[in-house]
Image (spheres, grey):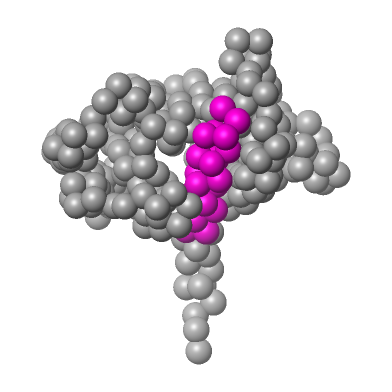
């Protein structure tokens, strides 16, 4: 007979895996919408539609307005996520989905150094070695494009946008753990989408493009998947340590490869697979539990 406590401990990992799958499929829908109606318009509409769907459920269930400390985290993560999403979806219009996802895996490595600055954590020697592996993996992927003669201005713009997104994603790792411990999944998803959409809406006079009818269904699907992914990951991070859940992020490459081929017939190249292996190995080395507890200083105010 199965041990209920063992199954209970597994639930956060299943939730995190489901969240990664939802968000990987969302990336495919968003690439289609961004190519059809423009990256900015697709990104802001995804956030606003998702907020419009989930907000009534939060308003119905809420007992009080979020506390000041919680609201600060909601606003902070919403701002981070807004520009993280905008830069990432722009990169998707320039790069294959699998390559973009693979390079974005350097975010956990960048998070180690941000944790040093923001949380006062000590950067271990293994983290430095892991960063070297991650950087090498990125070079392998980019080198594969150069070798195939596919490196042009559009690719360079996509890689630059992906670099910005990866830094913001790394900062997101620092915020999401604290946010998920102070608020439930529905509240997290509501403010994640709502704040992000409102922040991006400020740029509408400068970046907005007309909404194309063909983008409506992909945007609706992306909005629903955003909510499902955000709530699943928030639920998981509230019940398990980030270092245990981060490796599940790497399953996104498998989903990205599948959806990239199914939606856009994007082939996964050998350099992409080799580079991904180096990046994931580096992340595994950096985030694995060393088998002993270490004291961590109290986080600074973010």
Q: Residue at x 18, y 34 (%)?
A: 149
Tell me which secondary structure the magenta stretch mostly adopts: helix
86 vs 123, left or right, is: right
Residue at the bottom extreme, as displayed: 1
Where in the figure is residue 99, as x and y percent of width and height? 32, 42
Question: Residue at 46% of width from left, 28% of height from top?
Answer: 90
Location of residue 96 by image quarter: top left
Q: Position of residue 210 (x, y in %)?
A: 67, 24
The span shown in magenta is: 17-38
Front position in the image: 138 or 290:
138
Up/down of 79 relative to 35, above or below: above
| Total tally of numbered discs in the picture | 0
118 left or right, relative to 113: right
Q: Is residue 279 left or right of residue 230?
A: left
Q: Residue at x 82, y 41 (%)?
A: 56
Q: Nearer the viewer, residue 76 or 258?
A: 258
């Amino acid at each position: 007979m199965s041990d209920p406590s063992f199954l209970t401990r597994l639930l956060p990992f299943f939730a995190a895996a489901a969240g990664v799958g939802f968000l990987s499929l969302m990336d495919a829908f968003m690439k289609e919408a961004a190519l059809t109606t423009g990256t900015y318009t697709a990104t802001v509409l995804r956030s606003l539609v998702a907020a419009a769907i989930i907000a009534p459920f939060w308003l119905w269930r809420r007992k009080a307005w979020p506390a000041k400390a919680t609201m600060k985290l909601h606003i902070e993560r919403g701002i981070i996520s807004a520009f993280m999403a905008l830069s990432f979806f722009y990169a998707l219009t320039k790069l294959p989905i699998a390559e973009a996802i693979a390079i974005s895996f350097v975010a956990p490595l960048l998070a180690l150094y941000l944790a040093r600055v923001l949380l006062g954590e000590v950067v271990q020697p293994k983290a430095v070695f892991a960063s070297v592996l991650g950087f090498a993996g990125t070079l392998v992927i980019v080198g594969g494009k150069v070798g195939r003669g596919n490196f042009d201005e559009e690719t360079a713009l996509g890689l630059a946008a992906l670099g910005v997104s990866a830094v913001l994603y790394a900062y997101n790792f620092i915020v999401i753990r604290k946010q998920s411990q102070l608020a439930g999944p529905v509240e997290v998803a509501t403010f994640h989408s709502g704040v992000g959409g409102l922040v991006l809406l400020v740029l509408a006079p400068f970046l907005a493009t007309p909404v194309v009818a063909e983008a409506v269904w992909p945007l609706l699907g992306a909005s629903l998947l955003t909510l499902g992914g955000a709530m699943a990951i928030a639920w998981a991070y509230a019940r398990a340590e980030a270092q245990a859940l981060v490796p599940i992020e790497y399953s996104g490459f498998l989903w990205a490869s599948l959806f990239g081929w199914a939606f856009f017939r994007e082939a996964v190249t050998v350099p992409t697979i080799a580079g991904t292996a180096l990046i994931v190995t580096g992340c595994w080395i950096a985030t694995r539990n060393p088998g002993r507890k270490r004291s961590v200083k109290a986080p600074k105010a973010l």
